[in-house]
Image: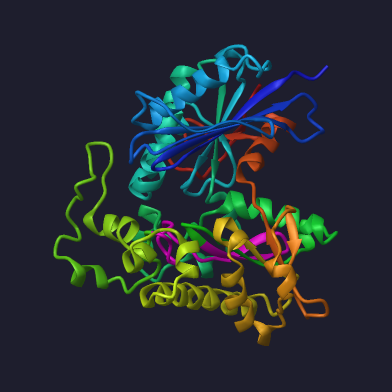
Amino acid sequence: MATQKIILAINAGSSSVKVSVYKSEDPSQPPVQLAEAQISGLTAPPATLDYKRASKTVCKDQEVKGVDSQESAFDAILDHLTGDHDLRDISDRDSITHACHRVVHGGDAPSAHVIDSATYHRLEELMDLAPLHNAGALSIVKECQKALPKATNVAYFDSSFHQTMAAGPRTYMIDPKIAQRNGLRKYGFHGISYAFIIRTVAEYLKKDPEDTTIIALHLGSGASACAIKNGKSLDTSMGLTPLEGLPGATRSGSVDPSLIFHFTHDAGKPSLSSSKELHISTAEEILNKKSGWKALTGTTDFGQISRSAAPECQLAFAIFVDRILGFVGSYYVKLDGQVDALVFAGGIGEKGASLRTAIVDKCRCLGFELDEAKNGAPIERVVQEIGKEGARHRTLVCQTDEQVRWTYPVASSTQNVKLIPAASSRWRGRVREASG
């Protein structure tokens, strides 16, 4: 008889912590979602809780007191879950068997890893590559190890999906010895989302993922594009960090590297957000947190920007479309025009009908065409067709679900999860399988 597993999928953002709860009793079946809790407003108090049990909304925007950090938010969520008498599968904290963490930057790690003291140390070493992105996840991992001592912690990396990129796309034209020593190359991100997208789109197209080739656009407050050939990442827009590539809500996207030194003479100095543990330069803070469409329009709400007639909003919209088109055209050529579908995903990709129209209208020369009625209809299915019948290539929207993607390997078998050996000084090298 299979042992029941209670799995937490944890996503720590800069201002929020989201935890989805899954139950797995049969390794051959997908895990079942039991609940979802999110505390938001950590950087703009008061903090509020949204909580769903199965598909039922139990509370929304409920103020929670004494919560002012990711650690305290996670602890409050655990108290809420164990205190919910209608959530019978979690009687106490010891009922939780696994905690799955989204970690943005995994370096060269090709797959998920069970987190022990050695792997935690490796993740700390990567903080210099992604101080703004890994810090939140690591703080929750540390809190998890203290609050859930019996649970197995597993890290899932946004960069792992892109380990299949060849040397050409992933290499920067800088001194190769320095690049290798410091790990300076393109890693790519949003990989958990792209893994879900290629799997579900292939199923929708009734094809094997290994026979499926798409151009995928994960468009949200953080945005990226990915060329996926035969189920594997060929190239992606984000680079050494998520800053490269498309602009976002507060990210500049790719700019001339010398721009920041003309923008401020303090580019290399520590920012005011730096701490003993968190080393952030002024340049990193400006380009990651004080740029993007918020810098142009004053808002991070791309839906508002899309509807506005204000010149600054129209400019921001046009810039986003222009940058996306550059990647779609480039990837179409790299894929030799052999593309099964152009796929929109992410919050903006799923909801932005006007953005999809602006992009696909410019891609008509490549064989993509929209059906206006389908594009304007609500997106209700995991994969939904919005392309015109008879077009050379299909156009789809995929409601990506990163959280559930993490739970599959744990639910099916922990033997699919790898662990870095303590003797390894880098992510490379032999790995041993986790037990239990």
* Lateral position of residue 261 relative to residue 158, left or right: left
Image quadrant for the C terminus? top right
Q: What residue occupies the far left of the structure in this picture?
A: 265
Viewer-proximal residue among 296 and 144: 296
Q: Was residue 234 drawn as part of the magenta stretch in this picture? A: yes
Please name the colour scheme applied to the rendered image: rainbow
Viewer-proximal residue among 248 and 357: 357
* Lateral position of residue 419 relative to residue 254, left or right: right
Image quadrant for the N terminus? top right
Q: What residue occupies the far bottom of the structure in this picture?
A: 365
Query: Residue 133's x, y, as percent?
Result: 40, 46
| Numbered range of the magenta stretch | 224-249
Q: Is residue 434 above or below residue 94?
A: below
Residue pictured at 42% horizontal, 66% vertical: 247
- Asked if residue 20 can be seen in this view, the reply is yes
Residue pictured at 19% horizontal, 47% vertical: 272
Query: Residue 304's x, y, as percent?
Result: 46, 63
- Asked if residue 342 can be seen in this view, the reply is no
* Lateral position of residue 4 relative to residue 218, left or right: right
Viewer-proximal residue among 50 and 276: 50
* Lateral position of residue 25 relative to residue 92, left or right: right
Query: Residue 435's x, y, as percent?
Result: 64, 23
Residue pictured at 68% horizontal, 17% vertical: 89
Q: Was residue 233 drawn as part of the magenta stretch in this picture? A: yes
Q: Is residue 192 above or below residue 321?
A: above
Callout count? 0
